[in-house]
Amino acid sequence: MSDLPYSPLLPNDPNFWAWLDALLLEILMQHQAVPLSRQALNHLSALNNYYNGFTDIQVKIYGALAQAHELSGNWLEAINAHRNILALRPDNIDAMMGLAKCYNKNGDKTQFLSTSYDVIRTKPTNWEFANYLTDALTNDPSLFQEVLDVLNHVLQHSPNAPIKMLDVGFIQSLFYRRAQLKKRNNDYFGALIDCFSVLEIALNGKPLKSFLDDIILCLGFSNYDPNQVPFIILPVNDSLRLLDLLFPTTNGLFPGHLGLSSQSDIRLAKKQVFGILYEISSAFESHPKECQYFLSDVAPLSSISLLFLYLACACYPSAQIFFEIAAMLNKISSVTACRQAAIGYLGEGIQLDPKNVDAYINLADCLYNDGNITGMTEVYEKLLSFHMISDENHLIRFAFGCCYIGDIAKLTATWSNALLYYKRAHTLRPNDPIFLASLTQANTHVCYWKDRGGIGYHSVDSNGNLNRFSTVQKSGQMALVADIVEKAINDGAKFGKGIIEKSGGILALLTNLCSNLRDDDKSVKFFKAKAAKWRNQTLNLKNEGGWVLRVIHHIMRRIQHKWYVDSYGDITQSPHALPPINVTPKLRSKYQRPLVPPGLEQPVATPIQPFYTFIYDLDPRQVRIICHRTALNIAYEGCTASWLDTCVFPPPPPPSPRLRVGYVSSDFKDHPLAHLMQSVFGMHDRNIIEVYCYSLSPNDGSSYRVKIEKGADKFYDCHAWTTESIVKQIVHDNIHILVNLNGYTAGDRNLIFAARPAPIQVTHMGFASSLGGL
């Protein structure tokens, strides 16, 4: 007793436990101000010795000693104190947890894991310690499987009945962590199960389908198919208050979170639900089959995904979620309301992340699609203030955006803005042929010659001075254009390389393409003679794909001619009208359209459009090949369009007696072509010619349009028609000769001609060069 500064009470004293608690608390309270003195430690040790043999009293004193040492960071002494408790009470779970935590603090990983596993085995429903353990293990990547094993062990004991309020936060955190680990382990289905478990905890056990109904009803949708979730466009302010609308009686708090004791716990739980909603929404996009398991027959996933994103936004508004909602809205629909809502979300996200280049470019795209060119321009001006955009994808999109603004300015003849933005696009991507072409074309429009350069004996320098040379020179923007064109020509020569060999060789390919023609057909004989000659030579073939497409289009004409001869004979005119061909399954098979060989991709169009070759210093060979490459691009689509019949288009009956001539143009309006040709249509000899006009532009009310319409026997305003509809109308009209008045000019629909709806097709007036074989 001499070591104690006070008289201890006996254990049987009715005030003993209150006295002991007060005494230990006083020592610990003193310890908060200054390190526990040696004297105080001696007092605790003496007190422990005095009550030796009274196990419960010693456990309490050792607990106080352990806590005192933990507060001072004396982990070894704290470990000894916890061990002493376990020597007295081996099943004391608090001492086991304290010992594990002290081992962790002292850096003894082996003992920490061993003791922690003892805790989990002894009491797997100690949710708070399970969270502590998995938190500690998660920081070590090498213990990934150990964390998963611990979570699997403890969560198999999670209650099926409503969870106690005090346990909600801990159990939700465990499911949330396991979902993340399963996703890292590519167990997407298992991760989804845990994600939905977290959501169920937050909803206090409410089924998912009922929860979806609650969301839809609170947003004002009452009459809808229970299995068909409506697509709801929710403005950003409404999504931010969605929790208040859903849970008005709890002030926007999830029902399962009512028992959480602190605001920090509530915030953490809401943030976890945010993460889960975001994960589920993403899974609807990436793993729809797995998600459908949880939703039975409820669809579509895109609408449900959007609702979950709205809810995630209400849980934890962030730039990331605002951008995700905008992307989802743009993906699902292009209606104006959807686009404008996306603009709102992008704006909110940019407020939180003002340097996000991708968001600015997405916003600019939305404004462009919404017709708000002023707003789009302001966004790009803001982007320019960032000075440096390093991401390659951002640079490309930004440059295209500048080019769009330049295009709009050009259409409105605001040339100063057009040149400004074309210049910016070219500066951002100086080696991109699209932006160089746009800039040089705009410069030529306004006769801005500085830096034009030239190829030949004349060149314009950076000051706009015309220089003459005695030898051929190559400089400035014209040199860049010529280099781009030459590179495109060289790359184009590789189109379809190896396709003949992949198709079984030249003879096998031709045999397949000519299968609906007789062996004595002059085209078949010509091609096979060429093939036989090539087989005996070692050839370095160029433009194999182009040759194949040209053969296909030639064979299409031969099959159409054969169909005509088989149906009407060799006559070129009939005294009376003969019936058009009725296409039957048998005829479809007999006059089957030759198909593009598997593996032959569509050729890339040249960076310089044929129409603009007139303003560049290009030689005739380059101009011809540009037109040819453009023709191949269109011809490929004319062989592969999804709306084409399996057979070639049937030929029209012979004239009886009038020949039907069709004119296709986008220039039946106040346009130079109409100025020159307005009288031509009415000047045809109506005894032998019947005139059909197919206008690709709307009526501009001009006198030219009126005169052309009067001059035609049949005039169609096709500007709003699909290419398929126009082609089918031409076939229905039994046109014998189809005239392309556009060529490669603005508003053309050259795919009409690539589909070959008429047996004879020619080009006239619109384009002052070759169409390159189309």
Image: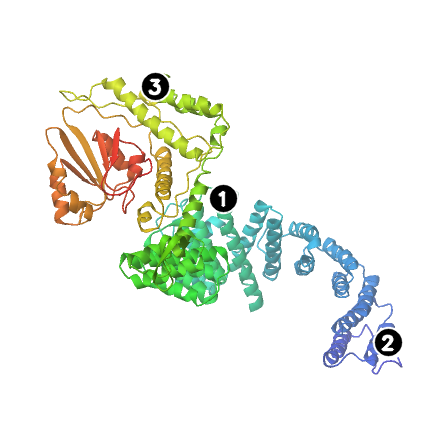
Q: CA–CA distance between discs 3 and 2?
A: 118 Å
Which quarter of the picture shows residue 717?
top left
The circle on residue 521 is 3
In the image, 365 versus 552, the foreground residue is 552
* Residue assigned mark 2: 46
Question: Which residue, as the protein is rendered here, is positioned at the far bottom?
Answer: 5
Looking at the image, is 539 positioned above or below residue 299? Answer: above
Point out residue 686 in the picture as x, y percentages from the top left corner: 10, 31
Mark 3 is on which residue type?
A: Asp
Q: Are marks 3 and 2 in contact (CB under 8 Å)?
A: no
Toward the viewer: 352 or 233? 352
> What amino acid is labelled 2 in the image?
Ala
| First in residue order: circle 1 vs circle 3 | 1
Q: How many marks?
A: 3
Q: In front of the other: label 1 or label 3? A: 3
**Disc 2, SS:** helix
Residue ID for mark 1:
288
| Helix, strand or loop for disc 1 | helix
Q: Nearer the viewer, mark 3 or mark 2?
A: 3
